Amino acid sequence: MKQTESLNTTAATLSAETLVQQCLKGDTQAYRLLYNRYSAAMYNTALRIVNRTDDAEDVLQESFIDAFAQLARFEGRSTFGAWLKQIVVNKSISYLRKKRVFMADIDDHAHSIADEQPIDDSGFYYSVDTIKQAVQQLPDGYRTVLSLYLFEEYKQEEIAQMLNISHGTVRTQYMRAKNKLVNVLKEGAYHEQ
């Protein structure tokens, strides 16, 4: 019993980078520890983008398979978690592309779209869970941009690169997603105090 507790305590204190080095030496327990440490967060990232639990599980599995296969390429320029998250986001986006979810490039029409229009949100207070539920009701393109920006904290320029669309398209998709989200929240009567 003490040996198991000691192993768990040691595992919890090992850095991800140390676990990566142990994986590269063939330590199967290190693979398991990395998976256990990051799987829940990466699943949530995938779910916010693909919007279906079974698809998020598939994306998660494919992401870890790819990450472990490419582990020798991890150079440590970012944290392991950030590197893995990028793989999950890319896999999620690839999944949406396979579903033929495309975002139209609207740069040519951007001049006809007003900049940030004020949203009347007075009297509306929402919990994080309520907002996440409402985000899941958005169309795939809106949900993807909004999730990457708000929840995953990517910059709009980074999102444009990831999705292979223009910065103007990201900006417009984000504005439209915010407006749609407010409407979903209002229509859903999510009035919380």
Image (cartoon, helix red, strand yellow):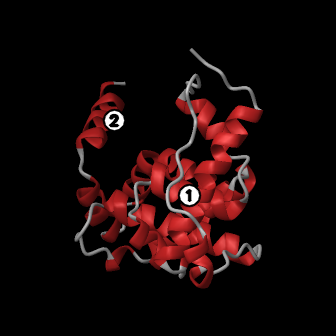
Q: Which of 14 and 139 lies nearest the eye of the viewer? A: 139
Identity, as a three-letter code, of the amino acid under mark 1 = Met
Q: Residue furthest bottom?
A: 108
Query: Residue 175 sits in which quadrant?
Result: bottom right
Left or right? Give the position of 3 relative to 29: left
| Image label count | 2
Which of the two discs, 2 and 1, labels the residue nearer the N terminus?
2
Tags 2 and 1 touching, CB below 8 Å: no
Residue designated by label 1:
175
Name the residue located 64 percent from the left edge and 41 percent from the top edge: 182
Q: Which of 115 and 156 lies nearest the eye of the viewer? A: 115
Rendering coords of residue 48 (x, y %): 60, 51
Q: Is residue 23 above or below residue 75?
A: above
Q: Which of 173 and 21 lies nearest the eye of the viewer? A: 173
Q: Is residue 125 above or below residue 101?
A: above
Left or right? Give the position of 120 relative to 30: right
Task: Give the numbered dot on residue 122.
Answer: none
Q: Is residue 100 above or below residue 28?
A: below
Q: Which of 100 and 46 lies nearest the eye of the viewer? A: 100
Task: Give the numbered dot on residue 8.
Answer: 2
Rendering coords of residue 50 (x, y %): 67, 59
Name the residue located 52 percent from the left edge and 64 percent from the top edge: 88
Name the residue located 50 percent from the left edge and 53 percent from the top edge: 42
* Dot 2: element: helix
Name the residue located 46 percent from the left edge and 76 percent from the top edge: 167
Inspect this view and state whether residue 79 appears: yes
Left or right? Give the position of 70 relative to 7: right
Identity, as a three-letter code, of the amino acid under mark 2 = Asn
